[in-house]
Image (cartoon, helix red, strand yellow):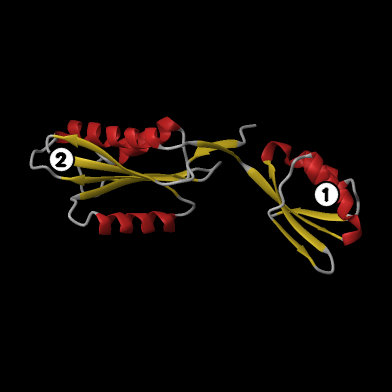
Amino acid sequence: MIDTYKTINVPKGEILFKDKGSKFFGYAFPISNEEDVKFFIEKLKKEHHSARHWCYAWRLGEENIRFRANDDGEPNNSAGQPILGQLLSFDVTNILLVVVRYFGGTKLGVGGLINAYKTTAKLTLDECTILKKTIDVHFQLIFDYIHMNKVMRIIKENKLLILSQKMELNCDFIIPVRKKNASKIQQLFLDLRCIKIKEI
């Protein structure tokens, strides 16, 4: 079972590539939804308000991956697709990759554009710190306080994290578990017979 994916945690920019007077600036942003895409594109349009094109591609999700590529006025498939190609080549997700172009007066032709956008995208990802993360299943644990020691023993023995905890009339924990270990961990808690556990 594949239960890992590659992504970035911090934005990277601006990576400059020049060709025949045109300047291409590359940026990579970690994203978690399409609203993030709009936010970063708008931000770059303000920063580079005199640029000609803001071309981009993104991939979102860990298992069912969605993606989009945008040529932003450049000839069809000459910008967005080469950028997306680099996201696929690096096998990364939850990333927005943007290349901002300032036109230098000389047309590059479709082949030149494809090369420029691909190269800028690659140089940008080369500069990123790419992390491998696990795909996690989140469980909610509800139990009486008197069973805390039993629960904590399983958590410590299996090196689990507690994302959130509420302790009122009873205890309510949220824990992430790596997908390939999820059924085993769930069974350990079920075997206690004093705890409610559900996937959320």
Gap between marks 1 and 2 measured at Cα: 60 Å
Q: Residue at x 46, y 33 (%)?
A: 91
Is 14 positioned to the left or the right of 52 in the image?
A: right
Q: Nearer the viewer, mark 1 or mark 2?
A: 1
How many tags in the picture?
Answer: 2
Query: Which residue appears farthest toward the left when viewing the image?
Result: 105
Q: Which residue is mark 1?
A: 152
Q: Which residue is mark 2?
A: 22
Residue toward you, 39 or 18: 18
Question: What amino acid is labelled 2 in the image?
Answer: Ser
Q: Residue at x 81, y 39 (%)?
A: 157
Which percent across, then down, holds residue 1? 65, 31
Which percent across, then down, holds residue 23? 19, 41
Q: Secondary structure at mark 2?
A: strand
Which percent across, then down, holds residue 120? 28, 36
Which disc, if any, is residue 190? Answer: none
Query: Which residue appears farthest toward the bottom when viewing the image?
Result: 169
The quadrant in which residue 110 appears is top left
Question: What amino acid is labelled 1 in the image?
Answer: Met
Which percent across, then down, holds residue 125? 38, 36
The quadrant of the picture occupied by the C terminus is bottom right
Of mark 1 and mark 2, the one earlier in the sequence is 2
Against 34, residue 122 (above or below) is above
Q: Is residue 69 visible?
A: no
Q: Residue at x 38, y 59 (%)?
A: 39
Circle 2 packing at 10 Å, graded few (<14), some (14-19), many (20+), is some
Circle 1 packing at 10 Å, graded few (<14), some (14-19), many (20+), is few
Q: Secondary structure at mark 1?
A: helix
Q: Residue at x 34, y 33 (%)?
A: 122
Q: Is residue 42 visible?
A: yes
